Amino acid sequence: RHGKLPFFSKFLRDTRLDELPQLFNIMKGEMDFVGPRPVRPEIYDKMCKSISNYDLRFNVRPGLVGYSQLFTPHSSPKRIRALIDNRMIYLKRRVIWDILMILVTILAVLKKICQMLFSFFLNNIIRIKVLKAYNEKRGLDRIKQKNAEISIRPFPTANHDVKGQPCREEVKGVLVDINEEYFKMQTDKRLDKTTTYLYRLQKRIKKKGKVKRKVALCKGDIFKVVELNGDPYKYSYVIKYEPISQFNHYMVDQYFLNKSLMNFL
């Protein structure tokens, strides 16, 4: 089991407040408020050197607030982050854009701070100290899911591909909650505990009056099963999962784990 980060450490990491010391670099003229985030030489050589047009970021000063840092989770593929950074670089010379980005970042961070403090107060003060509720021992926080469905089928064989297309053997269910290692789902079908399955996670997200579907493909094994008494589902499963690709890892972090700061606006 992963040890749970102390609240203060998680608070600094998730709100990006641990980056505030870089204000001194802005005062020295080495950084801007807004721009591509600095990249360490060893990371550049190992993961970024081969990415097309990645070096465009070196034509401008790095920023305290990164474009891709604001719109994507930290685990996003470097290629996706480079595309966002390169597109934003062309807007860099507009002062109004910098001001807007700073204001958006402040609002997102403030909302994240309020949510984390409220969650800490509710779970650690009210539930545990006042109501004497059970103290959660899990090392990773579970994110409750709304409007999230799941389709299950045996992991690819000669008769199954990995493209996430429906097939006759699919089992339908709902995604209840998820963290970085496990998710809980409910379905009315009994699944074989010895079989590795392909899970198609799908979430409906409403933005600008339109409903969009976000999909992530993961493979996983059944960790725990509980029989339910009520309707509409007969079984609850805890699945130890792994996204099948770097892009699907990004989709899980962005739309199911809500790791992007922009998700808090």
Image (cartoon, rainbow, N blue to C red):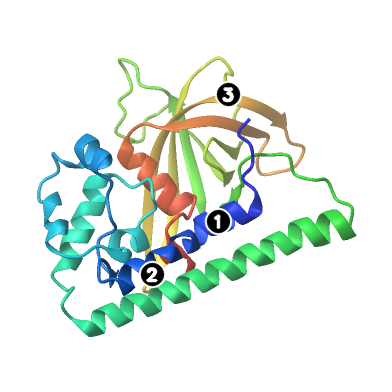
Q: Are marks 3 and 1 in contact (CB under 8 Å)?
A: no
* Contact check, label 2 and label 1, Cβ < 8 Å: no
Disc 1 crowd, CA 10 A, few/some/many (<14, 14-19, 20+): some
When the figure is inspected, residue 40 is found, relative to residue 222, above or below; the finding is: below
Measured along the vertical axis of the image, is residue 10 above or below residue 62?
above
Label 3 crowding class (10 Å Cα cut-off): few <14, some 14-19, many 20+? some
Which is nearer the N-term, disc 2 or disc 1? Answer: 2
Circle 1 sits on which residue? 146
Q: Among all residues in the image, which is located at the extreme front? A: 28
User: SS class of the residue under badge 1?
Assistant: loop
Q: CA distance from mark 2 to mark 1?
A: 38 Å
Query: As rendered, which of 24 and 129 lies closer to the eye?
Result: 24
Question: Which residue does the image show at 49% across and 69% down from the upper left?
Answer: 109
Q: Circle 3 sits on which residue?
A: 191
Disc 2 versus disc 1: nearer the observer = 2
Q: Nearer the viewer, residue 105 or 248?
A: 105
Q: Amino acid at mark 3?
A: Leu
- Residue at the extreme bottom of the image, as rendered: 96
Kindly indicate the quadrant of the structure image that contains residue 199.
top left
Residue sitting at 36 percent across and 73 percent down?
208
Q: Which mark is residue 220?
A: none
User: In this image, 56 relative to 15: left or right?
Assistant: left
Q: CA distance from mark 2 to mark 3?
A: 54 Å
Picture quadrant where residue 125 is located: bottom right
Give the SS element for disc 2. Answer: helix
| Amino acid at dot 2 | Leu
Residue 23 circle label = 2
Q: Dot 2: few (<14), some (14–19), or many (≥20) neighbours within 10 Å?
A: some
Q: Quadrant of residue 243?
A: top left
Which of the two labelled residues, at mark 2 and mark 3, occupies the earlier sequence position? 2
Residue type indicated by callout 1 = Lys
Q: Pinpoint residue 183: horizontal percent, then vertical percent.
A: 56, 38
